[in-house]
Amino acid sequence: MTYSITAQSKANNNASMQIKQSDINFGTTKASADTLANPAELFLGSFSACILKNVERFSGLMKFEYTKAEITVGATRLEKPPRMDQINYKLKIYSDDDSLNINLLKKNIEKFGTIYNTVSQCCAINGMIIKIPN
C-alpha cells in the first residue's frame, strides 16, 4: 500500500494540503500560530486519527458496539534536536456493551496501528482507554 498527498505554501503566508477530497489549511507563520494547526499538531492529529480508525475497525472484529470515541493527546517536545519525546493519550469509549474488552482493544491498537507503530519506534507512548457508560 502506498500513500500520496500534495501540499503547498506561499512566502510569508500559510500552507495547505490536499488529501483525497479534503483541503487542510495549516500554519507556517507566526501570525497564524494561535489560529491554525502547526506541523506538530497535525502529527498528533494523524496519531489520533490512527487510533480512532482502529477503534472503528476493531469494533467489528471484536464484535462490540459503541456510540462515540474521543481521544485527547499530549506530547513533550525536546529542543535539541527538535523532536517529540513522549506522547500521552486518553481514549474514552462510550459504550454499554459488556463484550468490550478494553485490554484487548488497547493491545490491538498498539499492534496494528500504522501511525502508532511508526511513532513508537522513536518515541515513548503512554496511553489509557476508559469505557464510559452511555
Image (cartoon, grey):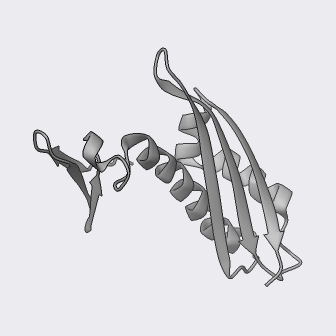
Q: Quadrant of residue 123?
A: top right
Using the image, determine if residue 131 lies above or below residue 38: below
The location of residue 126, given as percent across then percent down, is 73, 41
Q: In the image shown, does 96 or 74 lie closer to the viewer? A: 74
> In this picture, is 102 found above or below 75?
below
Say left or right for 10 vs 116. Answer: left
Q: From this viewpoint, which residue is outermost toward the right?
A: 98
- Screen quadrant of the C terminus: bottom right
In the rendered view, tell whether residue 9 sits above or below residue 93: above
Q: Vertical placement of 61 versus 88: above or below?
A: below
The residue at the point 65 percent across, 70 percent down is 69
Q: Residue at x 72, y 53 (%)?
A: 108
Number of marks in the rendered image = 0
Image position of 108 (left or right of 35): right
Let me know if residue 28 appears in the view: no
Question: x, y percentage for residue 89?
Answer: 68, 50
Q: Residue at x 35, y 46 (%)?
A: 33
User: Looking at the picture, how far across and down is residue 86, in whole percent?
Assistant: 64, 33
- Determine whether, in the image, residue 42 is placed left or right of residue 126: left
Name, please, the residue furthest toward the left.
11
93 left or right, relative to 98: left
| Viewer can see residue 56 | yes
Of residues 86 and 1, the one nearer the viewer is 86
Q: Front-most of 31 and 96?
A: 31
Residue 30 at x, y percent in the picture? 28, 40
The answer to which quarter of the image holds residue 18 is: bottom left
